[in-house]
Amino acid sequence: MAYRATHEAMPLFGVYALLFAEQGLDAAQITSLLAVWSVTAFVLEVPSGAWADLLDRRRLLIASAVVYTSAFVTWLLAPSYWGFLAGFVLWSLSDAMKSGTFEAFLYDELAAAGRTHRYGLVRARAETAGVVVMGLAIAAAAPLHQAGGFALVGWVSVAMTLVHLLVAVSLPRAAPVEPPPEEEVVPPPEPVSAAAWLHTLRAGVHEAASAPAVRRVLLAYAAVVALVGLDEYFNLVLAEGGTSVPVIAWVMAGIVLAEAVGTWFADRVALLDRGAHAALVLGAGLLLAWGAWASGTGVWSFGALGVGYAAASSVYVAGDIRLQSAMSGDARATVTSVAGVVAEGGFLVALGLVGLGSLWWDLPEVVAAVALTLALPATLSAWRAPPARPSATAS
């Protein structure tokens, strides 16, 4: 999902922001780049999902990887505000093309092989791998910059996007469809057109809004995203609590490792019944609130933030597994993209509440209060969200 891709890359944005500053950009310009990046991904999310239900998904993933590479090449060829802006638009387009497409491709390929029971396991492991690689990328940024500055970091980034492209090219082609019986009359497929795209878009949005199981999963999904989104303030909360910068770096590394552990078990979390699901979400909210409130007390607050964030992240990834299990229509990529838009909405709610509260109170207290406030609807919606079918997550 575009939200997830953009959100996970936020720590990398902090690294690139320092590089942009070296190229002469000021804080306002860097902030506007972040805004354009987020807004573009939000606008393109659902429309691109509808195309993924009409076009060859493997080719769309390859095209997404090509656009991703072009984003970083643009930065290197035009290291200016407008070059960076164009690169972020391309990055958002790439994320939108991949959003929903990857999840639908994975599910349908497993379905063609009669192995949909592997979806949850593969999805959870893929998420964990992404978290670990992101952590390694952040750790590598400093020595790369020291060795070769902006250019070396940029070209290594391009090299990594080419690896991404090679992986996309190596994906299996669509499984052959069994021919229908001779007596069965099958209408020819609808040609790819604007009308077909609009029809698919409507079908996906309709399923997301009207199918009770899908709608409940989407609401739970948005509610837990609001909790996950609080990680954007962890650095500031720790700093205001008196934690030194070197210690903050180690704490954030630990939180990333905790997130990797949490996502590893997401396939099992997707199977939790409503009571256990709600209890895990409530526990995550309480731990995040306590970790923020007690941010100056040392290791216990660090642990609370890490465990709370790991639990919330695990529930978040499990939400996609529950969603794929709940869907029954043909617009799988479109519905998944709708989930991305819903997720972005939950994230914006969290940002808005923290921003408003910080006008009057200190940030640790605000984040703690927002975590407690958001934990209530997240817990209630988790209680109502149906678990994934065991056949969708069994290892």
Image: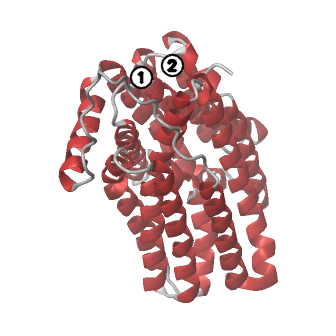
Q: Which SS class for mark 1?
A: helix
* Disc 1 + disc 2, Cβ < 8 Å: yes
**Closer to the camera in the image, 326 or 60:** 60
Name the spot of residue 303 as percent of width and height, x first: 73, 36
At label 2, counting other C-alpha atoms closer than 10 Å, the crowd grade (few under 14, some 14-19, many 20 or more) is many
Point out the image quarter for the C terminus. top right
Which quadrant would residue 186 be assigned to in this image? top left
The answer to whether 297 appears left or right of 319 in the picture is right
**Closer to the camera in the image, 26 or 391:** 391
Spatial CA distance of label 1 from label 2 is 7 Å
The answer to whether 391 appears left or right of 350 in the picture is right
Name the spot of residue 297 as percent of width and height, x first: 72, 41
Determine which residue is flagged by label 2. 388
Name the spot of residue 314 as percent of width and height, x first: 60, 32
Q: Residue at x 77, y 71 (%)?
A: 142
Q: Is residue 171 above or below residue 17?
A: above
Tell me if I can see residue 178 in this picture. yes
Which quadrant would residue 202 be assigned to in this image? top left
Q: Is residue 214 above or below residue 97?
A: above
Looking at the rendered structure, the kind of residue marked 2 is Ala
Q: Earlier in the sequence, mark 1 or mark 2?
A: 1
At label 1, counting other C-alpha atoms closer than 10 Å, the crowd grade (few under 14, some 14-19, many 20 or more) is many
Looking at the rendered structure, the kind of residue marked 1 is Ala
Determine which residue is flagged by label 1. 326
Q: Residue at x 60, y 28 (%)?
A: 120
Q: Residue at x 48, y 66 (%)?
A: 91
Name the spot of residue 357 as percent of width and height, x first: 40, 47
Q: Residue at x 43, y 65 (%)?
A: 37
State the residue lying farthest toward the left: 195
The answer to whether 285 appears left or right of 54 in the picture is right
**Closer to the camera in the image, 384 or 168:** 168
